[in-house]
């Protein structure tokens, strides 16, 4: 399952695990560390036990079996501070395999005397893409929260961390490891777009905690470029400008981005679940309607739910401001 190419001698390394996800926040944060610090690969996870084919690929009429995603372990020997192991997974498996995959990874890295596990994630919020991105933390122990609060990281008092970014921390805690997930804020309408701003904020927190010397200027430049591209797309979609001229987007690009933008504006699952819960409660307790309306306005989705919302008052004859 996990094949070692080398067996590095490491001093109580910190472990960072990452997979592709919203805003590419987790994967690209770990990838940035790997590239700028010069990590070396030492093991490979062959994950055929955790991925079952759901389709085949067709190319020029020929059917091909799908490639099973893999994962790779890299190490970095630090001059000052702890050594680091990074795991980069090519894809997240179906949720029914998430816990067993996490256990396999944790059992492997424990051989290297790992005591601390990091994951990263995106935190979709109703913020503007030009606004600041804050970093939040959920951890296995209170003292970790305290240490990161000194670095300006806010504590996630409630919520959930979906997928392997959360599950592997739960497994790590069960196996007596300490750990934390750092979540970077991204606009909820850009969940499928790379977000260098959130990546940079997470890396600032990590570098402060692990005493790393990172130059994040390339992320600032990348963030500015992506913000400008989003502005161009939004301007075009409003009918205020043509995609031609100075824009690097051609007509095919624009059509694709128009379709993608419709997908980007979907509510995060956690927000939708909260709205559904408030609807159910409001049926029995109409005083919760104001709280529900506030939540719908917060996510700018009142029109989507307007009929259901008004139905709450039809039999009562109530009004709401």
Image (cartoon, helix red, strand yellow):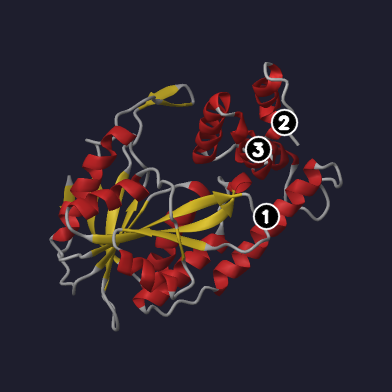
The image position of residue 33, as x and y in percent, is 40, 67
First along the sequence among labels 1 and 3:
1
**Location of the C terminus (image quadrant):** top right
Mark 1 vs mark 3, CA separation in Å: 25 Å
Q: Which numbered disc, 2 or 3, marks the residue that appears first in the sequence? A: 3
- In the depicted view, which residue is nearer to us: 28 or 166? 166
Q: Which residue is mark 1?
A: 128
Residue 282 in the figure: left or right of residue 57: right
Q: Secondary structure at mark 3?
A: helix
Examine the image and state in which quarter residue 212 appears. Answer: bottom left
Secondary structure state at the residue bearing disc 2? helix
* Residue 312 in the image, given as x and y percentages of width and height: 65, 23
180 sits left or right of 204 in the view: left
Give the label, 2 or 1, closer to the camera: 2
Residue 243 visible within the image: no
In front: label 1 or label 3: 3
| Residue underneath mark 2 | 303
Q: Is residue 137 visible?
A: yes
Question: In terms of depth relative to the viewer, which is nearer, 184 or 318?
Answer: 318
| Secondary element at image label 1 | loop
Seen at 52% across and 73% down, the residue is: 216
Q: Quadrant of residue 120?
A: bottom left
Q: Is residue 39 above or below residue 90?
A: below
For marks 2 and 1 on the same chain, the one whose residue lies earlier in the sequence: 1
Q: Which residue is mark 3?
A: 290
Residue 42 located left or right of residue 261: left
């Amino acid at each position: 399952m996990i094949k070692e190419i080398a067996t590095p001698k490491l001093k109580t390394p910190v472990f960072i695990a990452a997979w592709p996800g919203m805003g590419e926040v987790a994967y690209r944060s770990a990838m940035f560390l790997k590239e700028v610090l010069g990590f070396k690969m030492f093991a490979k996870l062959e994950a055929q036990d955790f991925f079952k084919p759901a389709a085949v690929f067709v190319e020029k009429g020929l059917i091909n079996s799908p490639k099973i995603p893999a994962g790779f372990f890299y190490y970095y020997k630090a001059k000052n501070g702890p050594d680091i192991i990074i795991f980069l997974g090519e894809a997240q498996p179906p949720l029914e395999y998430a816990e067993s995959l996490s256990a396999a990874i944790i059992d492997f890295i424990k051989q290297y005397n790992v005591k601390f596990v990091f994951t990263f994630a995106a935190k979709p919020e109703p913020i503007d893409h030009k606004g600041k991105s804050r970093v939040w933390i959920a951890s296995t122990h209170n003292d970790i929260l305290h240490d990161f609060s000194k670095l300006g990281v806010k504590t996630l008092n409630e919520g959930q961390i979906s997928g392997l970014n959360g599950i592997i921390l739960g497994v790590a805690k069960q196996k007596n490891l300490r750990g934390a997930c750092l979540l970077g804020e991204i606009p909820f309408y850009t969940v499928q777009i790379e977000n260098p701003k959130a990546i940079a904020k997470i890396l600032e927190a990590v570098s402060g905690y692990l005493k790393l010397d990172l130059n994040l200027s390339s992320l600032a430049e990348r963030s500015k470029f992506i913000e400008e591209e989003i502005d161009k797309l939004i301007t075009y979609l409003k009918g205020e400008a043509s995609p031609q001229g100075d824009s690097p987007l051609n007509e095919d690009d624009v059509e694709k981005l128009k379709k993608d933008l419709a997908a980007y504006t979907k509510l995060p699952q956690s927000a939708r679940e909260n709205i559904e819960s408030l609807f159910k409660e409001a049926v029995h307790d109409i005083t919760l309607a104001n709280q529900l309306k506030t939540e719908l306005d917060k996510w700018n989705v009142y029109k989507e739910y307007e009929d259901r919302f008004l139905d709450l008052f039809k039999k009562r004859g109530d009004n709401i401001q």
